Image (cartoon, rainbow, N blue to C red):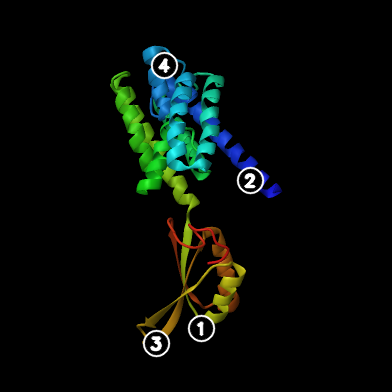
Amino acid sequence: MKKKILGWVKKLSLITIAIAIIAVCVNMFLGPHSIAAGGITGLAIIFEDMFGLHRALTILIANAAILVATFFLLGKEIFLNTVIGASLLPLFTWAIPQIQLVDDIMLSMLVGSALFGVAVSILYHNRASSGGTAVPPLILQKYLKLNPAIGLFISDGVIVALSLFVFSLDAFFYAVFSILITSITMRSIEAGMNKKKMVYVISDHNTAIMQDIMTKINRGVTLVPVVGAYENTQKQMLMVTLDAKQYQDLLAIVNAHDKTAFMVADTVTDVHGRGFSYESGTI
């Protein structure tokens, strides 16, 4: 129970930090330069210019509507997490001052967009969102298997198109580049978080190495028959997929049994199956 409570506290803390970062990006980096590229926050920037509505009010109304879609399409867990983010975002947007932190529009756009991507990645990693157009990418990911970064690019594109009729052409292009930078940041973070190692080992001590891999680092091993072209000899090659942080443990195991073993390691960013995309104690 204590571990579960600590897990929720950590999760809630990360969600709160991510929402605060989004609000900072909108009020201090993007909003002051009329860069409407942050989903529902971008819509709030547009409505503030058109109708004089406070950004926080627009976000609050829009998030109330999006929560209904979240409940029916994404399930109870994400709905509860979205309630947290959807409630905190208008609060932080109202509380954080609307000031122009960086005078240079290009620098402001670059910093704000990158930080926005970091914040949204934190939310996605915790199966949460800030509401608004952060929800459609989750829906597209669930039902169409579309990468969240691409989904965010599509949903935000609608907001950017609207900004073309409200702000200058320069602001429109800055908004387009802002979305691109946010998407690139998200994809880079996602690739780094999911990074795995695919390792191939050829040794005369396969049995001992294989046993240690399965017992000490709890990873499965696939035996692949191979033929050496030079000597035309048949051998068994070990194929192992593991977390990048486990690679040093694997090296230690192989070196302990055979310092002359032939090894090839490759970095992969997408692995599915038991032990990776499914819950399981062993693989």
> Where in the figure is residue 205, as x and y percent of width and height?
54, 82
The residue that mark 4 highlights is 48
- Distance, label 1 to label 3, CA atoms, is 12 Å
- Distance, label 3 to label 4, CA atoms, is 74 Å
Q: Badges 2 and 3: C-beta atoms under 8 Å apart?
A: no
Between circles 2 and 4, the one closer to the viewer is 2
The residue that mark 1 highlights is 204
72 relative to 39, above or below: below
Amino acid beneath label 4? Glu
Tag 1 secondary structure: loop
N-terminal label among 1 and 2: 2
Amino acid beneath label 3? Thr
Tag 2 secondary structure: helix
- Distance, label 1 to label 2, CA atoms, is 44 Å
Q: Residues within 10 Å of mark 1 (few under 14, many from 20)?
A: some
The residue that mark 2 highlights is 7
Q: Between residue 143 and residue 34, name the one nearer to us.
A: 143
N-terminal label among 3 and 4: 4
N-terminal label among 1 and 3: 1
Q: Badges 1 and 3: C-beta atoms under 8 Å apart?
A: no
**Residue located 54% across and 76% down the image:** 210
- Distance, label 2 to label 4, CA atoms, is 38 Å
134 relative to 23, above or below: below
